[in-house]
Each structure stands twice: as C-alpha cells, then as structure tokens.
Image (spheres, rainbow, N blue to C red):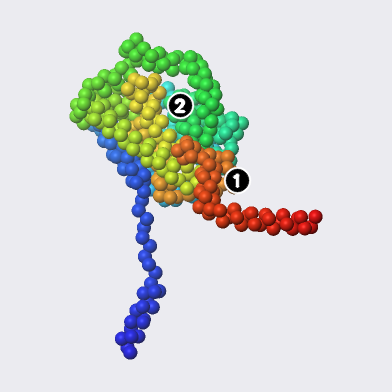
C-alpha cells in the first residue's frame, strides 16, 4: 500500500512539474552579423595602432604615447559594445518612442557645432573638448534613418508619392545643409544614399527617386563649383596625375600604398606610407594602410566581412516581423554598407576623396558608437524583436515592401492563399452557397 501511494505521489509531482523552456537557437543571420562586426572591430584596433603609433613618435619624439589612439579606441569601443548589447536585447522596444528626441537632439547639436564647434583642418565638425568630443553628424545619420522608418512604416502610402515623402525630404534636407555648412560633403553623401535605400525598401518608385537624385546632383555640382577645394578634389579624381604633388597628392599616395602591398603586403607595422605620405592615416586613409601592410589579401578580407554584414542585414530585414523593423534594418544596413563602399572606392581611386571613414575600422569615437548602436538594433530584429506600434500607424494594403520581400506583394500573397483554400475546399462550399442562394431566391419569389 505504501509503495502504491509513493508511486501515485511521484506521478502527481511529475504532472505538476513544469517542463523547462528550451532557449530558441539564434538564427544564422544573427551569428553572421555579430561575427563580421567583432572581426572588423578587432582589425580596426590593430590597424589604428599600426597607423597612428609611428606618426605619434615622429611628431612628438620617443617620449610620446604611441598607444594614445589605441587606448581611446579600446575605451570607446567598450562603451559602444555595451550600447550594442543593450540595443540587441531591449533597443527596438524603446528606440521608436525616443526617435523624436534623438532627431531633435541631433539637429540642435548640428546648430550648436556651427556656433561653438572645434575647428580641425579647416572643418568645424566637433563639439566639446579634451576627452569628450562629439561629432553630431554621426548621431544625425542614425536619427534620420530611425525617423524615416517610423514615418514610412506608420503611413506606408507616403513612400508612393513625392508629396507623401515631403516631410522626410524636408528634415533630411535641413540636416544635410547644416552638415554641408561644417563643411562635410562626405557625410552628406552617406545620408543621401542611405535615405534613398530606405525609401526604396519602403516601396518608393524608382522614377520618384530619380527625380530627387537629379535635384541633389545639380546642387552637389553647384557646391563643388562654388568651393575651390571641392572642385580641386573633383578634377584630381578625373585627372589623378595632373597635380600629383598638390590636390591629387593624397589620392596618388593611396594608390602607391595599395600597389606596393602586393598580394600579401609588407607585413603588419612595416608600411612607410603612414609615416610620411598619407595624412590622417588612422582615419580616412586606413584602407590604404591595410593594403600596404596586409596586401590584396587584407583588402579582400575587409570586403568579404562587409559583404557578410550586408547579406545578413538584408536577410534579417526580409525575415522581420513588422514593417517598421523591415524598413529600419534595411536602412541601417545600407548606412553601414554605403559608408564602407564610399571609403573603399575613394581610396582605390574609383571615387573622389570625401573624408568618409571606414566603419568599425577607422579611428573615430562618435562614428564607432553610433555604428554599434545601429548594429545592436539590427541584432535585436534578428533575435525576433519587435517595436511598439506607433500611434499614427493605420493598417493598409498600400505599403508593399517589394524590395525587401523579394518582389512579393502582400495583397497578392493573400489572394493566392485564398485561392488555394477555395481549391482545397472543392465544390462543397460552392454547393452550399448555391443552395442558400436558391432558398433566398425562393423566398423573394414567394414574397413577390
């Protein structure tokens, strides 16, 4: 009797015991994104030290801190990784509500930097001093993508006409003019291309984007003609050997550094271009240092890591659970890839030099933290995160994210599913409807 009672109690305890929840495995896109990001960060720390240590010693003598830029990169990289970790777990739930605050704060800082910014090499792009210097344009890049995703997901019809895009175009235009006043044409180009990619992902018509691009192209050409240094960069790109010791010096030296690296490079730390020939080697020209010291193999590895990042980011956007997450991830992924493409093309002589750093790799504290925030939000979507619905969002069938969905239209998919269900149901449903119609018709005839 006691044995039976013991067995019964054990059975009851077994039924009451709650099964342990198994943690869902992370998708492949999450792991690819994280791997590419961490590899680029590690490469960046090594190359920043290699590119800056020699210059520090030559400028300040043997008593200088050759690891100055490395220490700052590691410190702000740790802060950025903390931001990325938080955003990857909780960011999407809170970031949509904070978008107006981030956008307003970035525009305020863009105004403040023009009034009380720090001038470096003829450009006023930083505010603050000493250890805490902020570059507001880096925050503005992410804030504008957040605003675009919120606006276009809340009212999907906006992306289908120039009139609907006008609020976004006005905000982007004001921000771009403030950044151009610093002056910083490179960041302006990154913003324009990234917002265009976001609009395309939201369903904008290529014809409308072409009209916007024509207007922006005319304005950019006008600004290049007005400013002599921009015109010099453009002419040096079109004719790189015309003034190799003047306006084309940096572009020519970048090509020499890349060519001298060969297949495997001269060895880590053995490059000479960073010491005497490449200005700002640890920021804009770090790709040339990679090519000289690590060769074609190093450049190919960098391109491969960014290709992994782009593939995983767009795949994450395709699998996202709502329109806001889809548009946001597509925009943030484009932001990173566009910036990397402009830097690589400029250093290789395939585009004019614009001073755009290489994401994750070049030295730049504001750029690093803003980019890692963007990565954290993409990782959050890859984990299955969703944002709170906006108050202004209204369900509609007009928002077709064909660029992300691979050309599929949601309405068309619903019709296809309905047709499949009807075909599966066979004629029974039709027969019942026919019988009901006959009965209703009989009643109408009887009553008439």
Q: Quadrant of the C terminus?
A: bottom right
Say if 23 sits above or below 265 in the image: below
Checking the image for residue 65, the label placed there is: none
Q: Nearer the viewer, mark 2 or mark 1?
A: 1
Crowding at dot 2, Cα within 10 Å, few <14 / some 14-19 / many 20+, comes out as many
Return the mark for residue 394: 1
Picture coordinates of residue 398, whole percent (x, y): 58, 40
Q: Are marks 2 and 1 in contact (CB under 8 Å)?
A: no
Q: Secondary structure at mark 1?
A: loop
Identity of the residue furthest to the top in this view: 242
Residue at x 34% of width, y 20% of height: 349
Counting residues from the start of the chain, the first of labels 2 and 1 encountered is 2
Q: Would you say 8 lies left or right of 448 here?
A: left
Q: In the image, is 251 to the left or to the right of 317? A: left
Quadrant for the N terminus in the image: bottom left
Above or below, comparing residue 27 to residue 294 in the picture = below
Residue 439 percent location from the top left of the image: 69, 58
Q: Residue furthest right?
A: 448
Q: CA distance from mark 2 to mark 1?
A: 32 Å
Seen from the viewer's position, the closer of residues 333 and 254 is 333
Q: Residue furthest bottom?
A: 1
Front one among 263 and 185: 263
Q: Residues within 10 Å of mark 1 (few under 14, many from 20)?
A: few
> Looking at the image, which is closer to me, 217 or 142?
217
Q: Determine the secondary structure under disc 2.
A: helix
- Residue displayed at 61% across by 31% down: 163
The residue to which callout 2 is attached is 189
Residue 39, given in percent of the width and then of the height, sits at 29, 39
Residue 5 visible somewhere in the drawing: yes
* Residue at 36 percent of width and 81 percent of height: 9
Residue 142's spot in the image, x, y percent?
Answer: 46, 37
């Amino acid at each position: 009797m006691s044995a039976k009672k013991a067995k019964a109690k054990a059975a009851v305890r077994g039924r009451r015991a709650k099964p342990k929840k198994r943690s869902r495995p992370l998708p492949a896109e999450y792991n690819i994104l994280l791997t590419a990001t961490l590899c680029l960060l590690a490469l960046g720390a090594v190359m920043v030290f290699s590119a800056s240590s020699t210059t520090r010693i030559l400028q300040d003598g043997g008593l200088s801190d050759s690891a100055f830029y490395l220490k700052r990169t590691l410190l702000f990289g740790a802060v950025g990784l903390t931001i990325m970790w938080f955003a990857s777990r909780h960011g999407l739930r809170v970031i949509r509500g904070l978008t107006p605050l981030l956008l307003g704060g970035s525009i305020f800082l863009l105004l403040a930097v023009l009034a009380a910014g720090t001038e470096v090499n003829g450009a006023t792009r930083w505010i603050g001093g000493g250890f805490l210097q902020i570059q507001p344009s880096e925050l503005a890049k992410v804030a504008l993508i957040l605003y675009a995703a919120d606006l276009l997901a809340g009212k999907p019809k906006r992306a289908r006409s120039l009139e609907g895009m006008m609020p976004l175009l006005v905000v982007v235009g004001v921000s771009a003019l403030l950044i151009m006043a610093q002056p910083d044409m490179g960041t302006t180009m990154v913003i324009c291309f990234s917002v265009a990619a976001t609009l395309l992902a939201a369903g904008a018509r290529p014809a409308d984007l072409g009209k916007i691009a024509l207007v922006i192209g005319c304005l950019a050409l006008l600004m290049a003609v007005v400013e002599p240094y921009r015109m010099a960069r453009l002419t040096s790109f079109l004719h790189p050997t015309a003034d190799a010791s003047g306006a084309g010096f940096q572009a020519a030296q970048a090509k020499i550094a890349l060519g001298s690296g060969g297949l495997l490079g001269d060895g880590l730390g053995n490059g000479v271009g960073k010491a005497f020939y490449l200005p700002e080697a640890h920021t804009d020209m770090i790709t040339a240092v990679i090519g000289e010291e690590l060769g074609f193999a190093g450049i190919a590895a960098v391109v491969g890591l960014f290709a992994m990042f782009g593939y995983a980011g767009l795949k994450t956007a395709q699998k996202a659970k709502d329109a806001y997450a889809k548009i946001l991830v597509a925009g943030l992924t484009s932001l990173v890839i566009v910036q990397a493409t402009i830097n690589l093309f400029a250093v290789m002589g395939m585009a004019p030099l614009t001073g755009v750093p290489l994401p994750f790799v070049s030295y730049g504290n504001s750029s690093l933290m803003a980019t890692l925030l963007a990565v954290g939000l993409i990782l959050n979507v890859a984990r299955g995160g969703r944002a709170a619905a906006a108050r202004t969002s209204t369900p509609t069938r007009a928002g077709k994210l064909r660029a992300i969905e691979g050309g599929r239209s949601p309405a068309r998919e619903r019709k296809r599913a309905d047709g499949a269900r009807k075909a599966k149901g066979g004629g029974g449903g039709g027969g019942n409807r026919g019988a009901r119609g006959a009965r209703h018709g009989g009643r109408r005839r009887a009553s008439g």
